[in-house]
Image: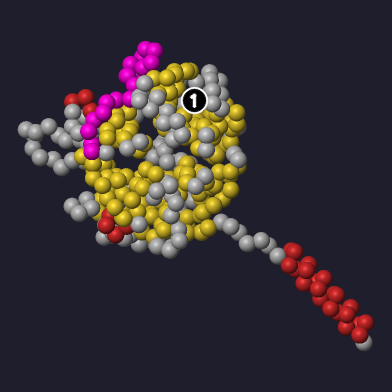
Amino acid sequence: MGDLFWRFILFSSIVSGFFACTEKPKSELIEINVPNKVNTEVTLNDIAESIQYIQLETRPDAFISRINEVFLHDNKLYIWYLFQKILVFDLDGKFLGALGKQGDGPGEYRSVSAMAVDDSSGEIYLFAGKKIMRYSPEHELIEEKRIDSSLDFGFDFFRILGGERFCISQEYGNVVEGGFANETKLYRFDAAMAVIDTLPLRKVIMEKKMASRLGYTDYISSFNGKHFIYTPVTTNENYLRDTLYQLRDMQLKPFAKLNFPKPHLDDRGFKQYLIANVVHTANYLSSHFYDFDNSLYQFLYHMESGQGYLVKGGFLDEDGDSLNLRVLSAEEDLFYFVKPAAYVSGEQEEANPVIGLVKLK
């Protein structure tokens, strides 16, 4: 009897261990539901710990009609204007000058496709056509060099992360079997800006050549040594690319999935949502996307509390204007907005916009 009892116990232990070993591991992918109802009256004061308004100085040599992106470094704002040049202002809005010189000669550039600041050295990099321009923290040109001739495409994103240099390319209309491919790739460069590694991020094959952009290049967001990546696809597909990935050692790991309200496709098979970006800051996840009628939405989600806001156009300021928030410093949960100056009269010179710095709660 005793021997039979212990045999039963041993058999039960083996069976229990077998099922424990074969049980599927739980997924680490975070799933976040995007509301199907827009929050119509969410103000900046509802989400912000502090708001700083900076009226940019208006000058003939620094008049700004359209801002592509804003960078903050060493208490200076670097305004990337119309893809053409970089204008520098202090935090009081005073114009400090332009970065570099425009032109086609040595030491000059005609337009900018990507910009980055090396936080450790304070040096500033510009990708300008087939050239890379490197400037000192005092805005003096240190080096100008040609991009590797084998890279016959441009880069629209450049960042220095943990001392490593990363670029992202958008390659359109590559001839492949079955048609044409639009491809996005991540490149890692050494200190001499030579390619040392490449990672394909997406590949969309189409019957005809098509190329379009959503105007956002917030591809990588970083804080506490962690890097997250999302690159948009604007051409139509029968599924939604709704996942933010974590970048580790040139490998992508799914991190967070946005569950958008269904259906994702309309009656014609077109995507209902065009996701422009998904970025992760120290405490928030933010995404901009367009719906089928080309309206812009922003989804802002607090990772710890689970509180999410979905707004159309942007968050409201004290004047009732909708302001679109973009990440300025992921480490600090710091965002920025661009607010055009109010029209006064045709007799007065139009003022430069206001830049708002919004630190979230």
- Residue 101 is a magenta residue: yes
Q: Is residue 243 visible?
A: yes
How many neighbours does mark 1 have within 10 angstroms: few (below 14), some (14-19), or many (20 or more)? some
Question: Where is residue 263 shown, x and y percent of the image?
Answer: 45, 57
Q: Nearer the viewer, residue 146 or 95?
A: 95
Residue for point 22% across, 50% down: 321
Relative to residue 316, is residue 232 drawn left or right?
A: right
Quadrant of the rendered structure where residue 250 is?
Answer: top right
**SS for callout 1:** loop
> Label 1 amino acid?
Phe
For mark 1, what is the residue? 153
Question: Where is residue 234 shown, x and y percent of the image?
Answer: 44, 41
Location of the N terminus (image quadrant): bottom right
Total count of labels? 1
Relative to residue 88, is residue 180 drawn left or right?
A: right
Location of the C terminus (image quadrant): bottom left
Q: Residue furthest bottom?
A: 1
Q: Which residues are magenta?
A: 92-109
